[in-house]
Amino acid sequence: MRFFSVLIVWLSVTAMAIGQDDSLPESVTTPYLAYEAAVEAGDEPAAAEAAEQAWRAALEASVDPAVLTILAENAGFASFRTADFETAEDAFLNAVEMNQLSAGDPLLRARSLRYVSDVQLRQGKSRQSFISAEAALEILEPLTPSEAVHMEIALSNAFMSSSRWARGQYRSAGRHGERAVRAARSAGIVQAPVFGVAAFQAGAYYSDDDQPMEAAYWFAVANSLLSQAGTGRDLLAATRAWGSMEREELDSEDRIALLDRLRADNVYQPGYEEALQEAFSERGEGWVDAVARDRRAPQYPTDAARVGAEGFALMRFDVNADGRTENVEVVYSIPYREFGEAGERAVREWLYQPATRDGVPVARPGIVTNIEFRMAD
């Protein structure tokens, strides 16, 4: 599988020499030539300004929809590069409209809709982002399967996953996350941070669904992808901690099956077998794990309860030989840090029957647990 960058880039040389097209008004060609010069010079702000001018002038002049599609996409890409997401959204929406008017390539229309979804998500418009990505999927699904179609399906699902996640709809997010990674595999392209995030969300879904084997698998996939990407350190830490928690639920037969599955799917990493076995090999015979005696639920954060927000806090802590918690750490908290703070206060008061080795109480390090915050029905 080759590496794939999901960063939006400008269109390369277009089929139409727009800057030399005598049929276009000077109000379009002049800023377009300035755009090309700015791209050549690597001046992104100037390129974005000129691309927008050319696109808006073409709109005012009612030029051919096919040309407008190109100009709108140029403006969208350039505006994205300068974080002007509002302009990028308008431009990509116009590209979708012009592509349809000119009976253009439906794959390109779906791609523009996926860009719309991206910039909407970056503006906090999670609901609109989901709708745009869903519309892209509706265009893509009837198309003849190809690497490009599979990749657009993968990216559309990834944005649907992230938009659901942003709205606290974690189960739906996980299902779309899984679809995103599977479609990316069909395209032969997986190694991008967006798919690491999607795999993490799939793991969270299966954890919530009490399927430790599936959860452990998807957290392993997320760990592999995020490690290769070298980004998202906080998410990577959460992936490893949560994956460790799920692996604790697997017996030796399940752990072997998990390793076989990871190898078959080309996500097996050297050292992962040791990670699967570490919690068990270190304890050996005569070990009895710590058992909770008093794990009172945390107090629901007032502000979150007021707006009906739900979430979770992934916690890691040690239990000393007296059965008290120590070194309590919030590994990951979503959507608000208050969930993590409430979880930390609760865990500090928890009591355990301490772990023992040959009947002698000993410390139990590295317990990971996920505290869910759900509103009562």
Image (tube, grey):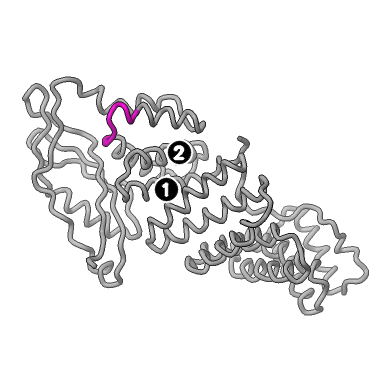
**Residue tagged 2:** 221
13 vs 294, left or right, is right
Q: Distance between the residues labelled 2 and 1?
A: 10 Å
* Amino acid of disc 2: Val
Residue drawn 59% across the image and 42% down it = 186
Label total for image: 2
Image coordinates of residue 42 in percent, x first then y, are 72, 53
Q: Is residue 82 visible?
A: no
**How many C-alpha atoms fall within 10 Å of the one at disc 1: few (<14), some, or many (≥20)?**
many
Q: Is residue 235 visible?
A: yes
Residue drawn 35% across the image and 59% down it = 335
* Amino acid of disc 1: Ala
The circle on residue 202 is 1
Q: Residue furthest right?
A: 22
Residue drawn 77% across the image and 52% down it = 12
Q: Is residue 346 magenta?
A: no
The kind of secondary structure element at disc 2 is: helix
Q: Does the magenta stretch include residue 251?
A: yes
Image coordinates of residue 330 in percent, x first then y, are 28, 48
288 vs 97, left or right, is left
Q: Are marks 2 and 1 in contact (CB under 8 Å)?
A: yes
Query: Does 148 appear above or below 373?
Result: above
Residue drawn 64% across the image and 54% down it = 8
Image coordinates of residue 305 in percent, x first then y, are 25, 68
Image coordinates of residue 97 in percent, x first then y, are 70, 71
Q: Foreground: 284 or 326?
A: 284
Q: In which quarter of the image is the C terminus?
A: bottom left
Q: Foreground: 96 or 250?
A: 250
31 vs 75, left or right, is right
Q: Foreground: 28 or 49?
A: 28
Which region shows up in magenta? 248-255
